[in-house]
Image (spheres, rainbow, N blue to C red):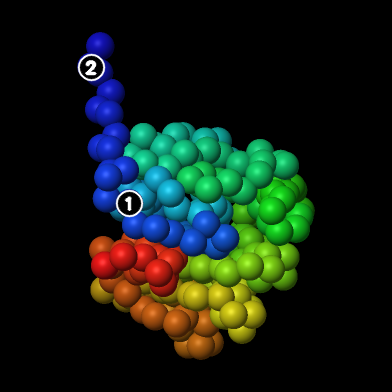
Amino acid sequence: MEALELKDDKSARLPQLDSNFVVAIGASTGGTEALSRIIADLPSNMPPIVIVQHIPEGFSRAFASRLNQLSQLRVKEAVDGDALDVGQVLVAPGDRHMAVTGHPGDYKVQVYSADKVNGHRPSVDVLFRSVANIVKGPRLGVILTGMGADGAEGLLLLRNSGAITLGQDANTSVAYGMPKLAQQLGAVNKVLPLHQIAGAMIKALTLKDEDP
């Protein structure tokens, strides 16, 4: 049996990141590959990351497992009540909404079945709105490739509540629907090609007193 390739140890070159952030990412068409690239490029000391990828029921667990193998982070399919922890990524299960609940120092995810939002379950807007309304500390929202409008209004709510927001550009998006509408609404602080998004996330989270 072929041995699994061990994850590269990047601990010696980790930036000093602000662990108080909550990072929320939304994606649809083309998002599985976009997320694979981004998550693989992030260091193990990232603040908690919550992800909604439009994906059918039964596929999200395998997708989370794939991300976990690629990443320095701990990636899992979210279960209702999971805590948001530094170094962990929670992926919404297919056919279930995921929202952040709780209070500073004790944020959790709620995973539940309810009506579709913008034609989707899980919905990016459900996640983004919860992060905007519940999380009291700093937040980072990222909208990636996808068709339709899901996530655009939620990202605008995030930006208007003081969050940093990033959007994938047209040239690297498989479907430039969700990020395009978010940009048109004024929800995006910065539009970037896919290969620059992980670096921009790290830069946004880097503590100001870090040594050069």
Label number found at residue 14: 1
Q: Which amino acid type is shown beneath numbered disc 2? A: Glu
**Residue pictured at 36% horizontal, 65% vertical:** 210
Could you say which is closer to the camera, residue 54 or residue 106? 106
**Residue pictured at 28% horizontal, 23% vertical:** 4
Q: Up-down: is 81 above or below 39?
A: above
Report the mark closest to the observer, 2 or 1: 1
Q: Up-down: is 185 above or below 117?
A: below
Query: Residue 95 at what x, y percent from top left?
Result: 63, 47
Q: Dot 2 surroundings within 10 Å: few (below 14), some, or many (20 or more)?
A: few
Asked if residue 133 lies left or right of residue 8, the reply is: right
**Residue pictured at 28% horizontal, 71% vertical:** 193
What is the quadrant of the C terminus in the image? bottom left
Q: Which amino acid type is shown beneath numbered disc 1? A: Leu
**Which tag, 2 or 1, sits closer to the chain's start?**
2
Asked if residue 132 lies left or right of residue 44, the reply is: right
Q: Secondary structure at mark 2?
A: loop
Residue 161: name its quadrant: bottom right
**Residue bearing the label numbered 2:** 2
Q: How many marks?
A: 2
Query: Residue 103 at what x, y percent from top left?
Result: 75, 58
Asked if residue 14 lies left or right of residue 26, the reply is: left
